[in-house]
Image (cartoon, rainbow, N blue to C red):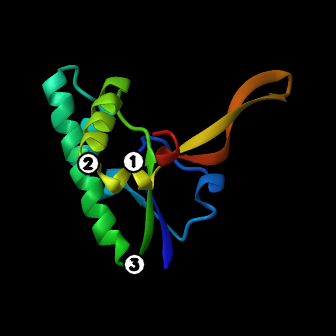
């Protein structure tokens, strides 16, 4: 079975992040309208809850669809901290098993110096499984 990474973030994935996966899917390509809404989350609580429900439904659909060819992991986060709160409140309140498939990328800040100029670079270290945090 394929190992599929489904990127919900607004970030371009690095080689280190994708090396252990056979396939990468992007929310921005699979559902551009939802991706755009998540990239500019509203400030209204009711709209945040509605958007959380839409993302949860999308992930549940993709889990079933992609689950026919492999195992899928959903890379988070996307949206504002307020949106994240609404999403996790909804997902855990209905005991959705989707949380078993959500991962976060953990990075380490490294300072590099090149030609006398220092810059910070964030290097992927590992994935953290959401289910181990709940």
At x 29%, y 51%, the residue is 96
Q: Secondary structure at mark 3?
A: loop
Q: Looking at the picture, tell me which residue is in the foreground, 42 or 83.
A: 83
Q: Is residue 113 left or right of residue 52?
A: right
Q: Position of residue 40 (x, y in %)?
A: 28, 30
Q: Is residue 129 visible?
A: yes
Label drawn at residue 98: none
Q: CA distance from mark 1 to mark 2?
A: 12 Å
Disc 1 target residue = 8
Q: Position of residue 36 (x, y in %)?
A: 27, 40
Pointers 1 and 2 in contact (CB under 8 A)? Answer: no
Disc 2 target residue = 56
Q: Secondary structure at mark 2?
A: helix
30 over 76 or under it: above or below? below
Disc 3 target residue = 69
Which quadrant, please, contains the C terminus?
A: top left
Q: Position of residue 20 (x, y in %)?
A: 62, 64
At x 29%, y 68%, the residue is 64
Query: Mark 1 or mark 2: which is in front?
Result: 2
Task: Tell me the crowding category of disc 1: few under 14, some 14 to 19, or many 20 or more residues within 10 angstroms, Cα based.
Answer: many
């Amino acid at each position: 079975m394929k190992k599929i990474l489904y990127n919900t973030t607004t970030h371009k994935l690095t080689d280190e992040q994708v090396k252990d996966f056979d396939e990468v899917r992007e929310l921005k390509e699979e559902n551009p309208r939802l991706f755009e809404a998540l990239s500019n989350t509203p400030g209204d609580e009711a709209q945040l809850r509605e958007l959380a429900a839409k993302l949860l439904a999308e992930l549940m659909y993709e889990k079933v669809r992609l689950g026919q060819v492999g195992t899928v992991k959903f890379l988070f986060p996307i949206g504002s901290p307020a949106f994240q709160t609404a999403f996790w409140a909804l997902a855990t309140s209905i005991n959705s098993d989707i949380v078993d498939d959500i991962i976060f990328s953990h990075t380490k800040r490294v300072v590099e110096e090149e030609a006398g100029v220092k810059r910070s670079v964030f290097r992927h270290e590992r994935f953290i499984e959401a289910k181990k945090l709940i």
